């Protein structure tokens, strides 16, 4: 009996494997049909020739190992209940060992590429340390392995990802890149998400912001350091980088000054912030050239972590990656490269252990009370933080501007 069950189980497994392989082969066939019948008319309308289209897709294959795929005919991927997961403490983002390593390498490369970086700053107005910091964060200064053939990634995701429209646009952009002659398809490699080369540009960003800075007639963000660095600077410049300004300053906010004043929409001259008793945590005065210019309060962990006055350039860095923590990482790394700075002096408190569903509940309660929390998604963005701080003050509580367990029962 046991032998019979073993044989039966083996047969079932073999049948399941055969069924999956057949289904997979069917998807491959559908992919080729999709390329010719669905995607080709779109590419033709965008100005791609039939010869270029055929050449680009001749060796392209579906990459079944990529994440976030939804193959036709396969069970739909289960949606993760994001609201039930814990969100991480902001402090976990800033690995001191990693930052020290990047800063040491960045200082060495700042010397090695000094003439290129000076020319870049003259051309685009972006300081070399900012460019180096992004280069280091995105690709380990060009040393990180970038393993994926970009056409395989984009074609796979355009055909069967959970966000096909985004990748259809990027796939069209990639065809235009190949058509331009800047790079051969075999060299056009990127990440599993479609970001390419040393600056990690999506193809559409390449078309808008990549530049030929070494004068060889090609925009090469895969092999050329000058092209890669200048392309990063051009991106920031076109997004509005203000030449001559810093990214921001770590500060100490006095207890009598509410933390509920943060956000890019509540800017005021830095001299006014200083007049409220907010000073740089280093003890240095704000630079004279910055005092009359606009600054914004930023408290990513409320009163439980480092506090900042940031400039509009902080939000330009966020254009590269829409995250406060990313922009702070780049700013801190740039300061380390330029002047040997270290970690933020404010300590990150023990925050971030709550369930996203708990934070979402707080957000919904604040909305019911008339507050604007931005996107109610269980993550405490600046609108949620300052709304929470306003509610705390009106409720006779000391504003902390950050959700914690003690507030769950109080905010209903």
Image (cartoon, rainbow, N blue to C red):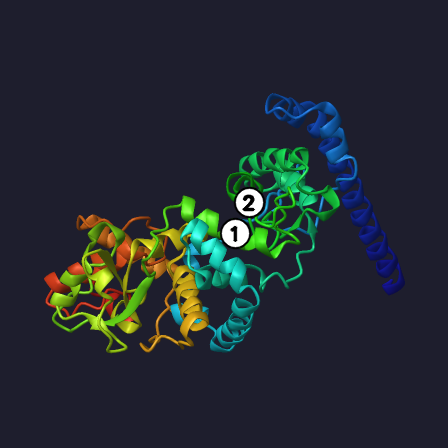
In this view, the residue in front, 403 or 79, is 403
- Whole-percent x and y of residue 161? 60, 42
Q: Secondary structure at mark 2?
A: loop
Q: Quadrant of residue 342?
A: bottom left
Residue at the (63%, 54%) spot, across then down: 224
Could you tell which of marks 1 and 2 lies nearer the N-terminus? 2
Contact check, label 1 and label 2, Cβ < 8 Å: yes
Asked whether residue 88 appears in the rendered view, the answer is: no
Q: Quadrant of the N terminus?
A: bottom right
Q: Secondary structure at mark 1?
A: helix
Q: Which residue was labeled with disc 1?
A: 230
Gap between marks 1 and 2, in whole Å?
A: 7 Å
Q: Quadrant of the C terminus?
A: bottom left
Q: Which mark is residue 394?
A: none
- Whole-percent x and y of residue 335? 40, 69
| CA neighbours of label 2 inside 10 A, class few (<14), some (14 to 19), many (20+) | many
Asked whether residue 27 appears in the rendered view, the answer is: yes
Q: Which residue was labeled with disc 2?
A: 211
Relative horizontal placement of residue 5, taking residue 255 as reference (left or right) = right
Can you say whether 382 is above or below 33 in the image? below
Relative horizontal placement of residue 355, taking residue 143 as reference (left or right) = left
- Whole-percent x and y of residue 216? 65, 45
In this view, the residue in front, 218 or 216, is 216
């Amino acid at each position: 009996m046991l032998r019979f069950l073993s044989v039966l189980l083996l047969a079932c497994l073999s049948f399941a494997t055969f069924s999956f392989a057949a289904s997979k082969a069917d998807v491959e066939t559908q992919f080729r049909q999709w390329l010719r019948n669905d995607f080709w008319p779109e590419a033709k309308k965008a100005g791609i020739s039939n010869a270029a289209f055929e050449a680009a897709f001749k060796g392209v294959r579906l990459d079944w190992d990529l994440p976030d795929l939804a193959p036709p005919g396969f069970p739909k991927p289960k949606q993760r209940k994001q609201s039930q997961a814990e969100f991480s403490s902001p402090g976990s983002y800033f690995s001191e060992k990693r930052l020290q390593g990047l800063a040491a390498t960045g200082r060495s490369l700042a010397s090695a590429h000094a003439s290129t970086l000076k020319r870049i700053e003259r051309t685009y107005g972006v300081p070399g340390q900012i460019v180096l910091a992004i280069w280091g964060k995105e690709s380990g200064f060009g040393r990180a392995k970038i393993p994926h053939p970009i056409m395989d990634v984009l074609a796979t995701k355009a055909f069967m990802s959970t966000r096909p429209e985004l990748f259809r646009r990027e796939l069209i952009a990639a065809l235009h890149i190949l058509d331009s002659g800047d790079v051969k398809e075999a060299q056009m490699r990127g990440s599993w998400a479609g970001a390419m080369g040393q600056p990690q540009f999506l193809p559409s960003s390449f078309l808008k912001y990549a530049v030929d800075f070494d004068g060889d007639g090609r925009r090469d963000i895969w092999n050329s350091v000058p092209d890669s660095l200048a392309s990063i600077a051009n991106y920031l410049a076109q997004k509005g980088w203000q030449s001559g300004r810093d990214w921001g300053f770590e500060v100490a906010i006095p207890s009598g000054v509410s933390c509920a004043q943060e956000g890019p929409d509540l800017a005021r001259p830095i001299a006014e912030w200083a007049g409220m008793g907010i000073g740089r945590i280093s003890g240095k005065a704000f630079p004279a050239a910055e005092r009359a210019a606009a600054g914004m309060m930023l408290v990513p962990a409320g009163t439980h972590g480092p506090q900042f006055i940031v400039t509009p350039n902080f939000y330009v860095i966020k254009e590269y990656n829409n995250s406060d923590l990313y922009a702070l990482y780049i700013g801190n790394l740039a300061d380390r490269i330029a002047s040997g700075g270290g970690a933020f002096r404010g300590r990150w408190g023990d925050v971030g252990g709550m369930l996203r569903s708990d934070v979402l509940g707080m957000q919904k309660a604040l909305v019911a009370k008339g507050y604007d929390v931005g996107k109610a998604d269980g993550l405490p963005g600046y609108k949620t933080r300052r709304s929470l701080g306003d509610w705390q003050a009106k409720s006779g509580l000391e504003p902390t501007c950050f959700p914690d367990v003690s507030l769950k029962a109080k905010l209903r």
